[in-house]
Image (cartoon, grey):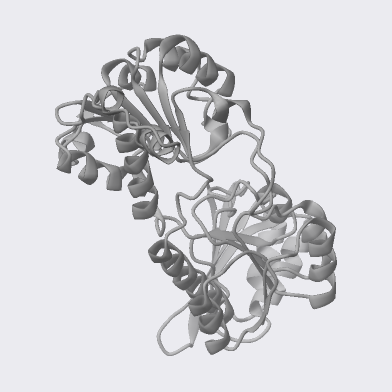
């Protein structure tokens, strides 16, 4: 199996892929048309990326079977195009959760104590204890968490260690689950924003979350509150955030920006980074050695499982529910040609198979095939399946 890696990747991961018998091509310089050509020339089975965008043209260029995002999100991959071509897309969720939570708290503490401004004045040769001795402190304040997945959960432990009261919202959060997590439940994002001193966002980017931190949210935040975004820039209405910083004194700690460069070093002109009360980092939330080693190990695990079983851990683009309307259950002897007979009759009836599994009983004498269909076979088709092969034992059609 050929694996093409086109972003920075840990040596332990490269060695791990080679150890399971993969041919590894590692070139972090490949982007855009050069990457299209590399996929075409190498005929790689697996593409591993971090920040590199994966386009429809790339997916068409060779014979990819799997794209692995060596990180938590996958918004840089054209998942729709991959799904249309039967290419698995997988990622490494949770492996960077601690690293992102650590950076979020670094930004919170830096904003409260104005660390960057302290350092800038010292480097400029100025001592200004009078100015920088002003800080509220974190103890006893309320932090609101938007999104309570693995990163949000890591935030809870760190917030409580600092003596912060934690309130939160996520789509799956219930009052009972909030109580079990030792936090306070809020029903909406706006309620969290209204009741906290620090608002920290930990949402994956989906059609439902795009722009969900909007003007309404910033309108109800307390003047001078801290806003942290270490998730994705697109979940925040950037114009509304800019307005809140300039007219409401919101202090923002941002690791993600709306127009980030696609290369590791480049000019950067996002105007929000130039605003007062904004502390920014270079999209480095997952960039600790610990996190990258964990992500590399998970990538090896994904590729190894795919290579050995054909299954993909953490796959993100399988249908949760197929268009199947009926389930054909065929109990049969475990012999060659039985399923070919069943599928030939289904094909002749112009019915599409949406999903299928074949369960073999102990001793490999008999099996049950469960076949999801997008339409019900006629009585005549069912009769041909039942009588046309002597190894068909029993047939049932269930409406889903």
Q: Position of residue 146 (x, y in %)?
A: 37, 32
Looking at the rendered structure, the number of numbered marks drawn on it comes to 0
Quadrant for the N terminus in the image:
bottom right
Query: 270 or 117: nearer the eye?
Result: 117
**Up-down: is 339 above or below 282?**
below
Front position in the image: 334 or 292 = 292
Residue at screen point 66% across, 38% down:
268
Whether residue 101 sits left or right of residue 204 in the image: it is left
Choose between 162 and 33: the one closer to the eye.
162
Asked if 135 appears above or below 20 in the picture, the reply is: above
Drawn side of residue 243 relative to residue 97, left or right: right
Q: Does residue 348 show up? A: no
Residue at x-position 59% and y-position 53%: 317
Question: Where is residue 49, by image quadrant?
Answer: bottom right
- What residue lies at 79% left-to-right and 69% top-to-bottom? 39
**Residue 102 in picture, x, y percent from top left:** 33, 48
Residue extending furthest toward the front: 125
Q: Position of residue 27 (x, y in %)?
A: 70, 71
Q: Is residue 372 visible?
A: yes
């Amino acid at each position: 199996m050929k694996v093409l890696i086109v972003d920075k990747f840990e040596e332990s991961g490269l060695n791990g892929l080679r150890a399971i018998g993969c041919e590894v091509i590692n070139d972090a310089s490949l982007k855009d048309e050069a990457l299209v050509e590399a996929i075409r020339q190498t005929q790689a089975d697996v593409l591993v990326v971090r920040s590199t965008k994966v386009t429809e043209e790339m997916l068409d260029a060779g014979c990819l079977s799997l794209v692995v995002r060596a990180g938590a999100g996958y918004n840089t991959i054209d998942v729709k195009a991959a799904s249309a071509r039967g290419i698995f897309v997988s990622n490494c969720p949770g492996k960077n959760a601690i690293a992102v939570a650590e950076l979020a708290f670094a930004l919170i503490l830096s904003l409260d104590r104005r660390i960057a401004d302290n350092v800038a004045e010292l480097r400029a040769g100025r001592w200004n204890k009078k100015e920088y001795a002003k800080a509220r402190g974190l103890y006893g304040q309320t932090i609101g968490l938007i999104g309570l997945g693995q990163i949000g959960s890591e935030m809870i432990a760190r917030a409580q260690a600092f003596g912060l009261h934690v309130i939160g919202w996520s789509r799956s959060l219930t009052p009972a689950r909030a109580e079990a997590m030792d936090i306070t439940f809020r029903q909406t994002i706006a309620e969290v924003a209204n009741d906290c001193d620090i608002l920290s966002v930990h949402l994956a980017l989906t059609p439902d979350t795009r722009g969900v931190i909007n003007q309404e949210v910033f309108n109800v935040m307390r003047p001078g509150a801290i806003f942290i975004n270490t998730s994705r820039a697109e979940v925040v209405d950037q114009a509304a955030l800019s307005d809140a910083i300039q007219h409401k004194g919101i202090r923002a700690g941002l690791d993600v920006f709306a127009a980030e460069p696609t290369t590791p070093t480049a000019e950067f002109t996002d105007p929000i980074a130039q605003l007062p009360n904004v502390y920014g980092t270079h999209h480095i939330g997952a960039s600790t050695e610990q996190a990258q080693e964990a992500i590399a190990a998970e990538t090896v695990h994904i590729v190894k499982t795919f290579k050995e079983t054909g299954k993909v851990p953490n796959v993100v683009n399988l249908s949760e529910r197929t268009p199947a309307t009926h389930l054909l259950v065929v109990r049969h002897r475990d012999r060659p040609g039985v399923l070919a007979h069943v599928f030939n009759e289904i094909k002749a009836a112009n019915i599409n198979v949406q999903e299928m599994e074949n369960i073999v009983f102990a001793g490999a004498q008999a099996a049950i095939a469960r076949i999801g269909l997008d339409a019900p076979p006629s009585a005549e088709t069912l009769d041909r399946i039942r009588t046309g092969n002597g190894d068909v034992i029993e047939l049932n059609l269930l409406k889903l």
